Image (cartoon, grey):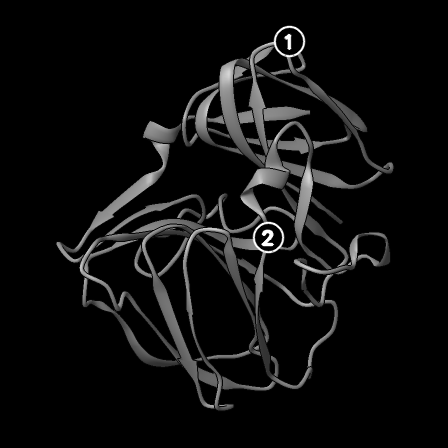
Amino acid sequence: MITIYPAEERYHKDLDWLKSRLSFSFGDFYEEDNTSFGCLRVFNNDTISGGRGFGAHPHREMEIVSIVLSGQLKHEDSTGHSAVTGFGGVQRMSAGTGIIHSEVNPGDEPCELLQLWFTPERPGLPPSYETSNYDPEQLKGRLLPIVSGQEAHKGEGVAHIHQDLTIFMTDLVGGQSLDYQTAAGRRLYVFVLEGELSLDGHHTLKPRDTARIRDVQEIKLQPTNEARVLLIDMP
């Protein structure tokens, strides 16, 4: 089953310094039938104004991934980690038994990012953090793993996550297409960052549209002209 969620139907939050598009119930936004998709609990598209951000706050029992799309994002946490990440960078934090962190935009220009939360493979993990970097040139014409908890996708430039999932990104241009296969019983989540995408020849996804896919083991991704796409394969 493939269910399409158009960008304009996502909840929009505007706090002046923070503009967010939420795919699932989060904070003061609640929809009883839209709290998660498999182990994916949060998928927020945030834009943070220069010099602003989220002050120190706690998390527990969650795998948190921040993918920077433009600008800079600074992370600091109670385990002593501090890092500034730009486009091509990924921040992965395992909140585990408890961690306090902050996320701010240290620059003058807006910072746009995706923030994803996943339930961990098991509770009680020790808190941890890492920053990884992928080469945007390697996105062209292939699904590049950027975050994974699967042995097959471990390697340089791939952030480790404590869950049986992989987050891929790709850049496709006209004439290119990608077929993706997964195992029976798994879920796929497709998000179009830029451009327009044909999914299986039956669904057209525009910028920031999403597809939630269950009980489908093979999909075809084909851009109308060009498209940047994120795909998550998860239990």
Count of numbered circles in the view:
2
Q: Residue at x 16, y 56 (%)?
A: 15
Q: Secondary structure at mark 2?
A: loop
The residue beneath circle 1 is 201
Q: Tell me the mark number nearer the camera, choosing from 1 and 2.
A: 2
Figure quadrant of residue 222: top right
Amino acid type, callout 1: Gly
Quadrant for the N terminus in the image: top right
Q: Residue at x 23, y 63 (%)?
A: 107
User: Of residues 209 and 112, which is closer to you in this image?
Assistant: 112
Q: Are marks 1 and 2 in contact (CB under 8 Å)?
A: no
User: Of residues 93 and 69, which is closer to you in this image?
Assistant: 69
Left or right of 98? Residue 39 is right
Q: Secondary structure at mark 1?
A: loop
Image position, residue 72 (x, y; %): 34, 60
Q: Residue at x 76, y 59 (%)?
A: 155
- Please tell me which of labels 1 and 2 falls first in the chain: 2
Left or right of 181? Residue 226 is left
Left or right of 17? Residue 34 is right
Left or right of 217? Residue 9 is left
Amino acid type, callout 2: Tyr
Relative to residue 175, is residue 180 depicted above or below? below
The residue beneath circle 2 is 134
Q: Residue at x 65, y 27 (%)?
A: 141
Residue lying at the far left of the rendered structure = 16
Q: CA distance from mark 1 to mark 2?
A: 30 Å
User: Of residues 144 and 199, which is closer to you in this image?
Assistant: 144
> Is disc 2 surrounded by few (<14), some (14 to 19) or many (20+) residues within 10 Å?
some
Image position, residue 149 (x, y; %): 75, 60
> Is disc 1 surrounded by few (<14), some (14 to 19) or many (20+) residues within 10 Å?
few
Image position, residue 109 (x, y; %): 21, 54
